[in-house]
Amino acid sequence: MAMKMSVEQPLWRALLAYRVLTCGYAVALYVHAYGELRHPLPGGVYMAVLTGWTLATLGRVKNAERCTRGFLAADLTVAVGGILLTGLVDSPARIQAGAFTLPSIWTAGSVLAYAVKGGWRWAAVASSLVAAADLIERGTPSRDTLHNLVLVWIASIAIGYVVEVARASERTLARALQIEAATRERERLARDIHDGVLQVLAMVQHRGSQAGGEAAELGRLAGEQQAALRTLISGAPPPRPPAGDTTGPPHDLRTLLNPLTSARITLSAPGTPVLLAPAAAAELAAAVAAALDNVRKHAGERAQAWILVEDEPDAVLVTVRDDGPGIAEGRLAAAADEGRLGVAQSIRGRLRDLGGSAELVSVPGQGTEVELRLPKEAAAARAGARGGAGLPARTEELSEAKGGSTR
C-alpha cells in the first residue's frame, strides 16, 4: 500500500477547509454590498455558481489523485471569471476605492490547489493568471492591489516548493525503507545459512581431514564450498581500488578480505559493511594477506587460520589467528637482523603509516595471533595524504624478492 505523505495530506485537508470558509466569506461580502452594486443580479448568479461549485467539488480537493488537471483548469476559470465579472457588477468608484472582487479571497484557494498538486511552477502560472485578471479588473493598479498580488504569488510558490521537497523526502524515505528491508532479509538468510549449511560443511571438512583417504578429498571440497558460500552471502567483491584512489567512495573491507579465504582460512565479519577509505582498506587487506602468508610458510599447508573483523565506533579491529606451532622467542628480532622484514614492514609498517598499530602474540605450541587496529579518523586522513595503493600481489612474491620468509 502506498505510504501517505506526512506533509501533503494535511495541506489537502487545510485547502478543503479554506475553500468552504472563503466561499462563505465571499457570499457574506456580496450580501453586505448588495445595495451598492451597479448590477447586483449577475453578481448573485455568480455567487450561486461559486457556492454550488465549491460544495460539488469537495471530494476533488481531498488528495492529489482526485485533483486532476481538468478540475484545476475549471476551478481557475471560475476564479478568473469572477474577477473579470466584478467590473460589470460593481461600480468604478467602488473598484477604485479597493472593493473586493466577487470571489474575494476564495481565489487564493484555487491557486493553492495548483501549488499542492503540481509544485511551485504550476503555482507560478496560476498566480500570474490571477494577477493579470486583477490588473484588468482594476484598470490602474494601486499599491494595495500590487501588494495582495505579490503576497499570493509568493505564498503559492513557497507552498509549492515545500510540497516538492516533501515528495522528494518521501521518495528518499521509501528507497531507504526498501534497502533496509532487503538488508534485513539478506542478514536473516545469512544467519540461516551460517547456522545450518556452513556448519555442516565445516563439520564435513573436519571429519574428512581426520578420516583421510577419499574422505579427506571430500572434506577438502566441502571446505572450498564453505569458503565460496561465505563469499556469496557477504556480497561479491568490487574491483580493487587502483593506485592513487583516495577520492572514491569508501570500500567495504569485507569484500577485500573475502578473496583471501579458502578451505583452511575462515572469515568472520559483521553483517553490515565495514567502510574505510579506499587506500586504507587496501593497505589493511594487504597486511592481513601478509599475516596469512606467514601462516602458510611457517605453520604449514594444513594449518587452520581465522580472520575476525570487528567494526568498533572509532576503529576497525582485524585479528588473524592460526593453530600452528607459534613463533620461537627471539625469532622476529633475528629475522629483522637477517633482512627479512615481513612483520616489521608488510604488517606493522602498513598499520603505522595509516596511524594504526599491529600487535603480535605467539606462544610456542599454541599458534600465533596478529591484532591489527586501525583508527577510522587517522586512516582517512593518512590514506588521503599518502595517495593509497591497491591490494598488492600475494606476499609470497614480496618474500621471494627479499630472498626469504616474510617473518
Image (tube, rainbow, N blue to C red):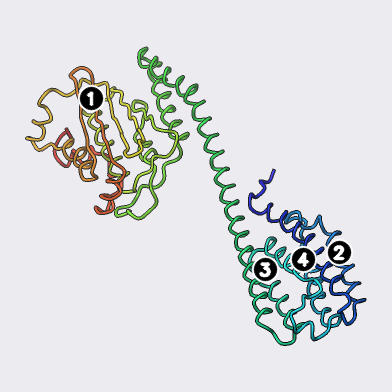
- Cα distance in 3D space between marks 3 and 1: 71 Å
Residue furthest top in the image: 211
Lower sequence index among marks 1 and 4: 4
Q: In the picture, residue 336 is in which quadrant? A: top left
Whether pointer 3 and pointer 2 mark residues with C-beta atoms closer than 8 Å, the reply is no
- Cα distance in 3D space between marks 4 and 2: 17 Å
Q: In the picture, residue 201 is in which quadrant? A: top left
Q: Nearer the viewer, mark 4 or mark 2?
A: 2
Label 4 sits on what residue type?
Leu
Residue 384: % across, % down:
28, 53
- Cα distance in 3D space between marks 1 and 2: 87 Å
Of residues 294 and 211, the one nearer the viewer is 294
Lower sequence index among marks 3 and 2: 2
Q: Which mark is residue 174?
A: none
Q: Is residue 212 above or below residue 184?
A: above
Label 2 sits on what residue type?
Thr
Of residues 83 and 382, the one nearer the viewer is 83
Which residue is the site of mark 2? Answer: 51
Q: Secondary structure at mark 4?
A: helix
Lower sequence index among marks 1 and 2: 2
Q: Quadrant of the C terminus?
A: top left
Whether pointer 1 and pointer 4 mark residues with C-beta atoms closer than 8 Å, the reply is no
Q: Nearer the viewer, mark 3 or mark 2?
A: 2
Of residues 90 and 125, the one nearer the viewer is 90
Q: Which residue is at 83% across, 84% downward? A: 91
Label 3 sits on what residue type?
Ala
Which residue is the site of mark 3? Answer: 123
Q: Secondary structure at mark 3?
A: helix
Which residue is the site of mark 1? Answer: 368
- Cα distance in 3D space between marks 1 and 4: 76 Å
Which residue is the site of mark 4? Answer: 72
Whether pointer 3 and pointer 1 mark residues with C-beta atoms closer than 8 Å, the reply is no
